[in-house]
Image (spheres, rainbow, N blue to C red):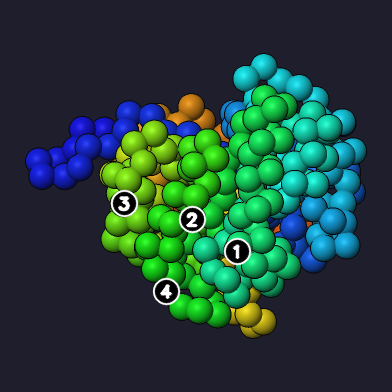
């Protein structure tokens, strides 16, 4: 898409990275059988998605929904051009993921001391010791490592996260050769300016940095934040089919709206004439099939819930005429 005069240029192409099989399923109370997970991933591949975060190598007692990580990787059919990623929160998780044959690993550290202790049972300093070892292990195995910076903007226990704190964490990890980062608005209450300022500060400080966005939608601004990210050079966006997912250590009773839906991201970029390599209608159909497969009561997705031109026209054709 050509930018209007005075507006930042937008990329010609962006990538949609699907996290539903990991981030989505870990947040649902139900533990789905292996066959259901395999079917879900096959739906996503058939829709045209080429990078999929399929599971997490974490203690089964912590997230029983993903206890079958090794079995899942062994059973996944391979497709040309499709990469399977897994989350590993510590060195042991990285070792297990490598042994299972994962294509990519995403590590995890939280920008909030309070949230890091609740989520990983480590201080940030202890987590950084793990990250250095994780980076060495992944490098030795030749497996790409992305570091997810969870709660990178706002914490439900500490409030605003200073930008300088995020920059400091990246500076330490960058010194260990880590140049690929995923910024997560884990609480989902941020707006476009905050996203742009953080991404811009990171890219200005570290010229070789690759930054993706993992957006949550509590305040309804996830798509606005995606556009804001694209305006400052972000080209990879993480979404979850049907909008399922969300932080597992959020305060009890907090409003739950999940991750930004992958199909909504696809529709946004289609409207902006930005290529994603994915046909939005196929992804919407996959979302509806996933909702039925997972027996979800609802989907946190405008596109899957009928918010498209095609769906409105279809309703118009069958709606009874007024007298």
Looking at the image, is mark 2 or mark 4 earlier in the sequence?
Answer: 4
112, 67: nearer the viewer: 112
Q: Report whether residue 198 is seen.
A: yes
Q: Earlier in the sequence, mark 3 or mark 1?
A: 1
Q: Which is more foreground, mark 2 or mark 4? A: 2
Q: In this view of the protein, which residue sits in the foreground, 219 or 147? A: 147
The image shows residue 263, relative to residue 223, as above or below, that is: above
Alpha-carbon span between mark 3 and mark 1: 21 Å
The residue closer to the viewer here, 128 or 211, is 128
User: What residue would you read off at disc 4?
Assistant: 160
Residue at which label 3 appears: 201
* Helix, strand or loop at mark 1: helix
Q: Residue at x 44, y 42 (%)?
A: 211
When the figure is inspected, residue 60 is found, relative to residue 47, above or below; the finding is below
Q: In whole angstroms, how far apart are the C-alphas of marks 3 and 2?
A: 13 Å
Residue 215: mark in rendering: none
Distance from disc 2 to disc 1, alpha carbons, whole Å, reads: 9 Å
Q: Position of residue 119 (x, y in %)?
A: 69, 66
Which corner quadrant holds the N terminus? top left
At x 31%, y 33%, the residue is 11
Seen at 75% across and 41% down, the residue is: 94
Q: Write down the residue under mark 1.
A: 124
> For numbered disc 4, what is the local secondary structure?
strand
Q: Earlier in the sequence, mark 4 or mark 3?
A: 4
On the rendered structure, is 318 left or right of 289?
A: left
Q: From the image, state whether disc 3 or disc 1 is nearer to you.
A: 1
Upstream in sequence: badge 1 or badge 4: 1
Residue 120 coordinates in the image, percent (x, y): 71, 63
The image quadrant that residue 157 belongs to is bottom right
Quarter occupied by residue 230: top left
């Amino acid at each position: 898409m050509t930018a209007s005069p005075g507006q930042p240029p937008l990329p010609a192409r962006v990538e949609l990275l699907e996290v539903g099989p990991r981030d989505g399923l870990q947040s649902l109370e139900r533990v789905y059988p292996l066959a259901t997970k395999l079917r879900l991933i096959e739906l996503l591949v058939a829709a045209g998605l080429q990078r999929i975060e399929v599971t997490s190598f974490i203690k089964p007692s912590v997230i029983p929904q993903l206890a079958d990580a090794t079995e899942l990787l062994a059973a996944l059919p391979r497709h040309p051009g499709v990469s399977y990623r897994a989350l590993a929160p510590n060195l042991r998780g990285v070792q297990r993921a490598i042994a299972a044959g994962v294509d990519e690993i995403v590590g995890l550290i939280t920008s909030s001391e309070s949230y890091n202790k609740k989520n990983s049972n480590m201080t940030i300093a202890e987590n950084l010791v793990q990250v250095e070892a994780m980076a060495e292990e992944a490098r030795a195995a030749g497996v790409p490592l992305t570091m997810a910076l969870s709660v990178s903007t706002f914490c439900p226990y500490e409030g605003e996260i200073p930008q300088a704190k995020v920059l400091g964490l990246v500076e330490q990890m960058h010194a260990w050769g880590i140049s690929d980062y995923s910024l997560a608005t884990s609480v989902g209450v941020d707006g476009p300016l905050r996203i742009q300022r953080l991404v811009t500060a990171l890219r200005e400080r570290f010229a070789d940095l690759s930054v993706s966005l993992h957006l949550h939608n509590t305040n309804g601004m996830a798509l606005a934040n995606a556009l804001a990210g694209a305006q400052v050079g972000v080209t990879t966006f993480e979404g979850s089919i049907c909008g399922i997912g969300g932080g597992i250590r959020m305060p009890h009773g907090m409003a739950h709206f999940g991750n930004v839906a992958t199909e909504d991201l696809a529709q946004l970029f289609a409207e902006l004439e930005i290529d994603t390599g994915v046909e939005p209608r196929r992804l919407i159909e996959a979302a509806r099939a996933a909702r039925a497969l997972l027996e979800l009561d609802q989907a946190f997705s405008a596109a899957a819930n009928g918010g498209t031109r095609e769906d409105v026209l279809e309703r118009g054709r069958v709606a009874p005429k007024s007298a």
